[in-house]
Image (cartoon, coloured by chain):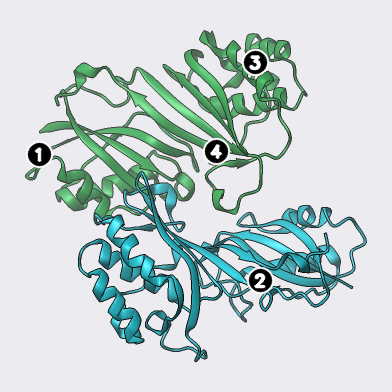
Chain colours: A cyan, B green
Amino acid sequence: MQRYFLNISYDGTNYHGWQIQENANTVQTEVEKALSTILRTPTPVHGSGRTDTGVHAIEQVAHLDVNLNFPLEDLPFKLNGVLPDDIVINNARAVKPEAHARFDAIRRSYQYKIHQKRNPFKGGQSYFYSRVVDVEKMNEATELLIGEQDFQSFSKVKTEVNNFICTIEKAEWISENDSLTFHVTANRFLRGMIRALVGTLLEVGIGRMTKDEFSEIIKGKDRRLAGRAVPPEGLYLSAVKYPEEIYLD
Amino acid sequence: MQRYFLNISYDGTNYHGWQIQENANTVQTEVEKALSTILRTPTPVHGSGRTDTGVHAIEQVAHLDVNLNFPLEDLPFKLNGVLPDDIVINNARAVKPEAHARFDAIRRSYQYKIHQKRNPFKGGQSYFYSRVVDVEKMNEATELLIGEQDFQSFSKVKTEVNNFICTIEKAEWISENDSLTFHVTANRFLRGMIRALVGTLLEVGIGRMTKDEFSEIIKGKDRRLAGRAVPPEGLYLSAVKYPEEIYLD
């Protein structure tokens, strides 16, 4: 058996998230089904982390153990041939036998996409928010996120986790024409964290909250202080980073 | 009563085309329903032309006659508030009482979008075609389309029309990264014409047909000579042009 990392993109609109569930269609279900078809044996995969219903991935990573009787380059091609069009395998790489898609990830990046002018072609793939926002003010507040901090104020209340410390390396809003994208990279994220951050930063953008008030919310460590979460359709897992030494190629 | 032109964008994925039909949801049905809701009276609209099931519009135009009891600028805003997210009214302009969205159009432009690398986010909005194509060769053949010609070879066989003469002003393939877009502008188009043209030009692109053979197909005036039509999801009505003098603003 050899371990591989699959690099996967998907439009999450029609799925109940990444993770396998009974009686609900998920991305993981589809990927495992495709693998079983191609490899003719049940083949579980382990993702780098969950994505919620309606959330997308430009780059999700999952590992699996298989014996291939064809060249590795053919695996993405064969899988894409049987997968639905909204899930695409970008590549497959051989990794060390102990490499783990979830536990070895050192950094994850997300994007949250907003369009400010109505656009019929962005359905399910971006959040429509038409209020005028001050992007400079939003970026000033966003800078407060950088570093190692307790982000309990932006965590889902019902969660098994009791460590709310995350190290945010990068967080920035980029405005282009009628689009606005929040880029964020951290060692880990809490459940619902990015959607709560974006919802709260939009309140800064429309002038309903100051940078100082945003700072107080972080310090308060109480989810009730933060703004409303924005919907899942704008959220994209965009990169998962591993140490180079786990790859065999 | 005052006549207005509505400028409309839509994602056609979920509609049986533009034109009203019984027992099928169409874009025109939705627009008239929204108008009736806002204006509280049944309000028919007349489009610049049909689009088929699954075909999109970056810019479709339709005229209507109404008495507005609020500013014209509010009409798009009010309509967008009740329309589904995949239909957007971009603007409304007052026109002369005899102006007609279909008969006064002097020029129509379409785009046909192709993506050559699998992309889960382009579902329904672009045609996935992975074979390597020679865009230069396609553009050499495409130049033969320019001018006033009989395009019967690219018309649907079952059609009420018996005039197949169209004047193509502009036709060009533009290649960018993994995308390929066919841009075409003419005074009129025949049913199924662009999808048949694109399908045939792709055969030139993959080397299965020469420029001379393409020329013979145009001259042959027989639909059986041309290539297979590509699917509707890549097709966009992108502009409808009228003489400036029909506008009152």
The chain ID associated with circle 1 is B
| Marks 1 and 2 share the same chain | no
Q: Is mark 3 on a helix, strand or loop?
A: helix
Q: Residue drawn at (47%, 85%), measured in percent from left and top?
A: A164
- Where residue A238 sits, quadrant-wise, is bottom right
Q: Residue drawn at (44%, 41%), measured in percent from left and top?
A: B17
The chain ID associated with circle 4 is B
Q: Mark 4 points at which residue?
A: B234
Of residues A246 and A29, the one drawn nearer to the viewer in this rendering: A246
Q: Distance between the residues labelled 4 and 3?
A: 20 Å
Mark 1 vs mark 2, foreground winner is 2
| Marks 3 and 1 share the same chain | yes
Q: Distance between the residues labelled 1 and 2?
A: 55 Å
Q: Mark 3 points at which residue?
A: B141
Mark 3 vs mark 1, foreground winner is 3
Q: Residue drawn at (34%, 47%), measured in percent from left and top?
A: A178
Q: How crowded is mark 1: few (under 14 residues within 10 Å), some or many (20 or more)?
A: few
Image check: B25 left or right of A34? left
The amino acid at mark 3 is Ala
Vertical order, B29 against B155 (above or below): below
Q: What element carries label 2?
A: helix
Image check: A38 left or right of B127? right
Q: Name the residue under label 2.
A: A28
Q: Mark 1 points at which residue?
A: B67
| Marks 1 and 4 share the same chain | yes
The quadrant the C terminus of chain A occupies is bottom right
Of residues A106 and B30, the one drawn nearer to the viewer in this rendering: A106
Image check: B221 left or right of A203? right
Q: How far apart are marks 1 and 4 (CA)?
A: 38 Å
